[in-house]
Image (tube, rainbow, N blue to C red):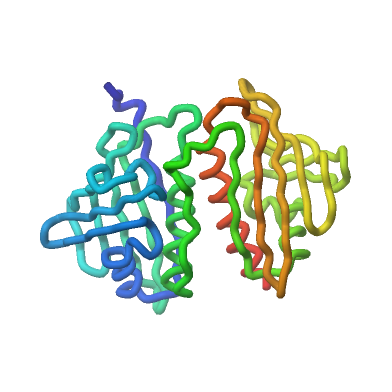
Amino acid sequence: MTQATDLQIIRAGVSIDARADRVYRALTGELDRWLADSAAVDLDAAAFDFWGPHVFEAPDRDSGRHAIVDHEPGRMVRFAWLVRGAETDVTITLEPAGAATRVEVTQAGVPQRASGAASIDDVWKVALENLRRWCERGEPPVLVDFARRPVGEARTQIDMDAPVEAVFDILTKPDLVRGWCGGDAEIDPVIGGRYSFGWEGGGPVEIVDLAAPSRLAYTWAYPAEPESVVTWELEGSGGRTRVTITHTGFGDREVGDYEAGWTSFLVTIRNQVEARG
């Protein structure tokens, strides 16, 4: 039985350059355009169902049934979501700000994650960025394949509307890296140089491959894990860049947590590098 002290409250948010009624329509009638492979929402029947291989812990219709607890048209939806065997409570609120909307998510009752399990924080970071870009641009989502259960190697990819040189800069200049890594980054951009996010306990260590502006690789170390290697490959074309991350060296360990984590970093980096112009 999960103890109350083992439960967490997850909070996430995003500002969207679209009116609240547009965001609410995406939230209640277009889940299959930014969040899920399939969806069936019926507010009158208190059903807020979304599922598919790209939905966290809801690969099929039965596991993707989410009962609506409460809703306020144009402003709020609250629903249940079964996570790691626990009934969590998700509230999504919309706060109009002129022609824009602030979206806030609170998910209560989330159990601590086991080793190799994706972080709910990462799940929401990707989902909310997908929601923002769908409402603002009508773009298809970046999705994590939770059904794939990768072993030994995590791999994810994204296209960015920015030149390859700008993307390489945001990966190698400490002041820019600090904007997305969540720590006080220190980088000596030479082979053998230090590459650190400034995290306590672990993370990047040393650059082992560097070819501007197309390739960066560094070692990665955490207690109780084998040393691994993170490789970034950048392919530029027509002012756009395809970024591929491959994180190798985990032996027979499942690494879905890393795949979801790197995807959340990628959508953050894409947002920042595109905003820089």
Is 205 situated left or right of 58 in this image?
right
Residue located 85% across and 40% down the image:
193
Is residue 170 depicted above or below 190 in this figure?
below
Residue 65 at what x, y percent from top left?
22, 48
Is residue 118 depicted above or below 168 in this figure?
above
Quarter of the image holding residue 15?
bottom left
Is 118 situated left or right of 276 in this image?
left
Residue 221 at what x, y percent from top left?
69, 29
Picture mark count: 0
Residue 244 at what x, y percent from top left?
65, 53
Residue located 28% across and 33% down the image:
86
Residue located 56% across and 39% down the image:
258
Residue 272 at what x, y percent from top left?
62, 63
For the residue pair 107 and 52, the one nearer the viewer reads as 52
Quadrant occupied by the C terminus = bottom right
Is residue 14 depicted above or below 80 in this figure?
below
Q: Residue furthest left?
A: 45
Quarter of the image holding residue 128?
bottom left
Is 173 situated left or right of 71 in this image?
right
Quadrant occupied by the N terminus = top left
